[in-house]
Amino acid sequence: MKNRNTFYIYLSLLFALVLDATYFNPSFEVIRPPLVLLTLIYWNIALPDKVGVSYSIVMGVLLDLLKGSILGTHSLLFVFISYLCQRFFYQFRVMRLIQQSLILFFIFFLVKEYWLLNSTLFGEMEVQILSNESLFNAFSYAFLCAFAWPLVFYLLRNYRRRWIK
């Protein structure tokens, strides 16, 4: 039974990874919600004893390989956010969905600024972190992620109730 549950968790993460790896319009790529990270957040809150930091490392390395980014950038970020979810899952779990979305808005705003700082430091792109355009992109990115959270939450909760015991 345990192997079957782990298989279904990996299957949902793999599906999110495939959706994250698909290429969309370049203007939408800047603000597209990271489904792997949203899925990891859900599993870290729903089943903290089954999903941990090791899932975050594996998914981060796979996403780095698929996107061609510097190895470890996604892993570092995923591990940090998974740690926060594991540490505060009791508090986060009892909040209403709108409160969870508000907290995730601030987390994803910092995530976007981290990715901008990372791409600026390693010379991938020339962007000023506090310019109007980058702040607008970060706010719109965080807003879309916070808006996508209830959808991901309800989809994965129904998935968990149906397939994972």
Image (cartoon, rainbow, N blue to C red):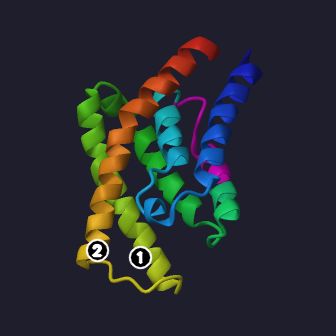
**Mark 1 or 2, nearer chain start:** 1
Could you tell whether 9 is left or right of 152 in the image?
right
Residue at position x 29%, y 39% from top? 101
Q: Is residue 165 visible?
A: no
Q: Is residue 12 magenta?
A: no
Residue at position x 27%, y 69% from top? 135
Q: Nearer the viewer, residue 2 or 115?
A: 115
Residue under circle 1?
A: 117
Label 2 Cα crowd, 10 Å radius (few <14 / some 14-19 / many 20+):
few
Q: Nearer the viewer, residue 40 or 29?
A: 29
Residue under circle 2?
A: 133
Q: Nearer the viewer, residue 89 or 62?
A: 62
Label 1 Cα crowd, 10 Å radius (few <14 / some 14-19 / many 20+):
some
How many numbered callouts?
2
**Dot 2 amino acid type:** Glu
Relative image position of residue 55 (x, y in whole percent): 63, 44
Could you tell whether 41 is left or right of 137 in the image?
right
Magenta part of the protein: which range?
Answer: 48-59
Q: Tag 2, which secondary structure?
A: helix
Relative image position of residue 81 (x, y in whole percent): 45, 50
Q: Is residue 143 above or below residue 90?
A: below
Residue at position x 62%, y 70% from top? 69
